[in-house]
Amino acid sequence: MDSSSESKKRKAPAGPSRQAEASTSGSRSRRQQRYRKAWETDPAFKPWLQETPDPYKARCRLCNVTITAERTVLINHVKSKKHCSKFNGTTDNQEPVSTSLKQTAKDPVARAEIKLASVLAAHNLPFEVMDHLSEVLRDIFSDSNIAQEFAVKRTKTTEVVTNVIGKSYKEQLAHKLRETKFSVLADESTDVGSIKTSCVVVRFFDHDTGCVESKFWELCEIYNTANSENVEKGATGNLYEGMLKTFEKHEIPVTQIIGFGADERSAMMGAHNSVESRFRNECPGLFVIKCVCHSAHLCASEACKTLPKKCEDLARDVYNFFKGNSKRQSKFVQFQSFLHLKPHKMLHPSQTRWLSLVDVVQRVLEQWEALRLFFEDLRSSERLVAADTISDSLRNPFIKLYYCFLDWILPKFTNFNKYFQSDKPVITVLHEKVSALFKEIILSFMEREYVMKTELCLIDPNRKDKHLSDTEIYLGVKVLQELQVSRVTARKYELKEFFQRCREFMSVACCEIKKKYDFSDNVISKLNCLTPTNALSSNFRKSVPSLVPLVTALPLLVPPEDSSLLQRLDDQWRILPLEGDNSALNTEDIDKFWTTLSKDKPNLTDLSQFALSVLSLPHSNAECERVFSKINLFKTKARNRLKTATVNGALLATECMKSTGSCCKNFNPTNDMYSLLAAKELYSNTSHSDSE
């Protein structure tokens, strides 16, 4: 009796609840969606949607069919030909299906999904949070229909960030690039997951904002493990082809590219088979520049090699001595308090950070006396080799002299570097700034008459017959003060070596500047004519009466065969002092100056557009470095499995909110985002859905 009843139970058809259990059994099955009463209030579903006894099914009263109770299935049914014919034939005053879909896409739940996804992307929060957050929101806001309808987990959040917010912004940016000239900035790096990627940034004049903008475009994976051919091509081939493919994918012609900027790596800027050489073959007349910030850093780094190694060792040894040891740090604070110094920690000299060295030098000088007393006390109480080595260096007056010299010379490179890390168009003053840096350094150790009467490109920093003597050379105020100490002046041999090494430092720095920058460059040396002061000056026309030399040096902006445009540009340049309004000089930014001039003076439109295109030329790839800094915040050790596509989408999403000038609180999804959210292609790329 018991066995027969059990067999009947096994043969009994599975009801809805049993189907739900069957569908949810197994770790790999997908959870079935139940029918929601709130769908009946949706304008797109209200005229035809009907509930069925089965909680996992829905019925269309127009088509008289039963379908699965999932929102995606309902939307696809609305688009079907059978339903459209039935729906359009019901009533004449019924709104069209397309309108209903548009209203469906803009429902509050969809808005909540997009906005919450933008919060995660903007604040570098893991998408895994959404596995719990949606349920918590339903529990907290039990009286909210939006919260009860909100059921987004990590997979959909990832897709919303990449295929909705990021994709929508990418399309808007691509539309702008199809209609305007732009430059390309590129850099490469290896992330925490050992994936080598290249960052592509585009620089162009945005007509919507009236400013020259640098925007993140694409994060390309250089070596794709799924494609073995990538390894055979090498880094250069993958870098170049990756950039071209992303432009071709969005139908952006290569002819729109007018400039290329990158660092000095051989893969980027090598003479043969580099990204630069391939770009030049593809775009003859392309403006190419090496990152001036990176070049300035390399000049200073090369010059530092002329100084004794003990200087660098002191900074590293002091940092390593205190690193991770709270007892030593606490004891050192007592010495700082005794000398009334701020309790600053010692800094680590980094080889990759452009501005770190000068901060390290200044921190060591600031804490010099506290360090000296601390290590002398430690030397008498503990027998440590590291402490003895540091103590000897701190008691050496010439080590301190070298630090005083670095404290004077390094800020010159640092200030130059900071200036050109700006995303504003500062390329017009590049020649002036490099010349000023070169002159300031070379006048400190070479005869003034020789420097002032010789062209910068012809000056030889290694001409020892033009070098100043030890008593005439200038090394900064702090060095002059330290030289008054008797224990320094008494050691003649070491003093002579100090002057010689400082002279070599400045000589090597000037040689490196000449090597990395061409003072006779026929483009950069002429760009100062576009600054507002020079553009409106009648006196400046005496030295630059025509724009022809500059225009002909940029054939991608003005084709050489277009003589009529060239003539119009030259005519507008010559009458600009007569037509221009000096009140425009109050504008701080050069791009806004030319934008205002273009709007107020229609007869100067050609000249203004040419100037704004020139201002789109790159001067550094600092924006790429900023993108890599964002990646390090987003892709951490705990999230090292994030796919490149996910990171790329998150970067585009944050760039989208940045471009609208709003934070995640004021961010409003666009119509394109609602359309993409409702599209069935939302999950077209599921390769990054399990990225965390």
Image: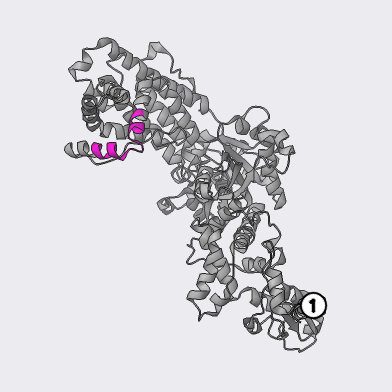
Q: Residue at x 23, y 20 (%)?
A: 483
Q: Is residue 483 left or right of residue 14?
A: left
Where is residue 403, by image quadrant?
Answer: top left
State the residue in front, 432 or 393.
393
* Quarter in which the C terminus is drawn: bottom right
* Quarter in which the N terminus is drawn: bottom right
Q: Is residue 638 left or right of residue 97?
A: left
Q: Is residue 539 magenta?
A: no
Q: Residue at x 42, y 22 (%)?
A: 305
Where is residue 329, by image quadrant?
Answer: top left
State the residue in front, 130 or 494.
130
State the residue in front, 615 or 16.
16
Q: Report which residue position mark 1 lands on.
A: 11
Secondary structure mostly seen in magenta is helix
Relative height, residue 259 to residue 497 (above, below)? below
Q: Position of residue 112 (x, y in %)?
A: 55, 70
Q: Position of residue 141 (x, y in %)?
A: 49, 77
Q: Position of residue 486 (x, y in %)?
A: 18, 17
Q: Residue at x 78, y 86 (%)?
A: 62
**Residue 672 visible in rendering:** yes
Specify the segment rendered in magenta.
317-332
The amino acid on which the numbered mark 1 sits, given as a three-letter code, is: Lys
Give the crowd class for mark 1: few <14, some 14-19, many >=20 residues within 10 Å: few
Q: Position of residue 290 (x, y in %)?
A: 55, 34
**Residue 656 visible in rendering:** no
SS state under label 1: helix
